[in-house]
């Protein structure tokens, strides 16, 4: 069946609020030899999409200017170097951009098969959270069975993924969240304790829960306001992993003495600027270590809401409101 020459995609008419998102008719992407062209069935909504819409997170050189960092669908064209994928394969992909569209070109190395029993919505909810959690909590943070971790923003897509995967791999997981409902969700997913940061002091609670030892890893999305507090709750040889700066990135008058005296590690990373080879390595590790847990039902993405692609502005408003628990997904 011949492919159309044009497709519907969501464009940003000007930096601004959700109202600047508008559908447009654009030419289909042309996949490179090491890429596949996916007919998108569902696409995840993520906070970097919000930042890019506002003009605060430009795509890296060579990436699609369209929004969207994860998609699930069917391969309709495969480049000569896109093995092992071929036409008709159902894949979920970590995109460099462009998922808010009917078709999206993605490096083959950044694709994974749908886990057993998954539909497009569940498959589309996987890549951004799993690539991020695997690279940061387990690779950079070196979380191991028998250790403990605190995940800030435990009810987010990344948080719900980190709680489940950490627990499945034998770690004790704690979380912070912004309401009783969100804390309850974290507990249902396997957190040993969930702390409402509006009403509780997470430092005091973690020290109480761990008999003053602290946790081995903190996965942080807040940044500057939490820096000293995060170090206070790290056990000796603990690791602080930064993946976002929702509260700002600059700290003044900071005391690094605890880093030396307790042999702490401070690290962090972003996913989008990594090379295809780096992302492909992570994809291979996920398929070996995490895909069996998904296919067996041991862990699963938590879907809060789905929206049609045409209703993308409403999806962004929900994301910015911060009331969701788990993932927001667009359907095509």
Image (cartoon, helix red, strand yellow):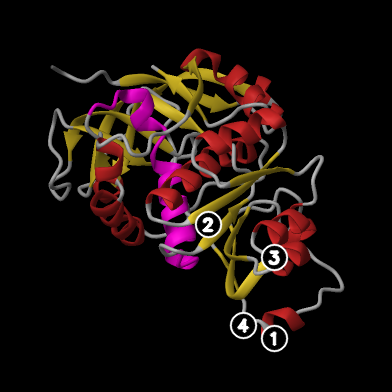
Q: Which residues are magenta?
A: 117-143
Q: Quadrant of the N terminus?
A: top left
Q: Residues within 10 Å of mark 1 (few under 14, many from 20)?
A: few
What residue is disc 2 on? 270
Callout 4–callout 1 Cβ contact below 8 Å? yes
Which mark is drawn over residue 263?
4
Number of the front mark, 2 or 1: 1
- Reply above or below: 138 against 63: below
Taking depth in this image into account, of 7 and 39 the one nearest to the observer is 39
Q: Splitting the image into 4 quarters, where does residue 282 fall?
A: bottom left
User: N-terminal of the two: label 2 or label 1?
Assistant: 1
Q: Is residue 133 visible?
A: yes
What residue is disc 1 on? 261
Relative to 106, is 167 on the left or the right?
right
Q: How far from the left and from the top, in percent, is residue 300? A: 38, 34
Q: How far from the left and from the top, in percent, is residue 258? A: 73, 79
Q: CA distance from mark 3 to mark 4?
A: 13 Å
Q: CA distance from mark 1 to mark 3?
A: 14 Å
- Reply above or below: 305 against 255: above
Q: How far from the left and from the top, in percent, is residue 40? A: 33, 25
Q: Is residue 122 magenta?
A: yes
User: N-terminal of the two: label 2 or label 3?
Assistant: 3
């Amino acid at each position: 069946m011949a492919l159309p020459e044009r497709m519907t995609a969501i464009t940003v008419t000007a930096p601004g609020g959700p109202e600047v998102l508008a559908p447009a008719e654009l030419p289909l992407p042309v996949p490179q030899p090491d890429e596949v062209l996916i007919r998108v069935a569902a696409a995840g909504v993520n906070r970097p999409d919000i930042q890019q819409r506002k003009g605060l997170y430009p795509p890296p050189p060579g990436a699609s200017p369209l929004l969207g960092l994860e998609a699930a669908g069917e391969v309709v064209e495969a480049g000569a170097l896109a093995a092992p994928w071929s036409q008709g394969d159902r894949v979920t992909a970590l995109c460099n951009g462009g998922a808010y569209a009917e078709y999206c070109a993605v490096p083959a190395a950044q694709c994974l098969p749908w886990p057993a029993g998954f539909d497009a919505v569940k498959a589309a909810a996987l890549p951004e959270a799993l690539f991020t959690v695997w690279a940061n909590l387990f690779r950079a943070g070196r979380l191991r069975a028998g250790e403990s971790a605190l995940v800030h923003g435990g009810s987010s897509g990344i948080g719900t993924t980190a709680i489940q995967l950490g627990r499945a791999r034998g770690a004790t997981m704690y979380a912070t969240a912004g309401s009783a409902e969100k804390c309850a969700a974290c507990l249902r997913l396997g957190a040993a304790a969930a702390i409402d940061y509006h009403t509780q002091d997470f430092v005091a609670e973690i020290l109480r829960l761990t008999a003053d030892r602290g946790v081995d890893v903190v996965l942080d999305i807040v940044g500057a306001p939490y820096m000293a507090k995060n170090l206070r709750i790290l056990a000796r040889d603990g690791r602080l992993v930064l993946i976002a700066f929702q509260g700002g990135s600059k700290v003044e008058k900071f005391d690094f003495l605890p880093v030396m005296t307790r042999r702490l590690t401070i690290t962090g990373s972003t996913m989008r600027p990594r090379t295809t080879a780096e992302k492909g390595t992570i994809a291979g590790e996920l398929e070996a270590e995490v895909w069996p847990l998904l296919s067996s039902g041991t862990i699963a993405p938590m879907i809060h809401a789905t929206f049609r692609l045409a209703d993308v502005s409403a999806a962004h408003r929900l994301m910015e409101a911060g009331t969701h628990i788990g993932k927001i997904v667009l359907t095509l």
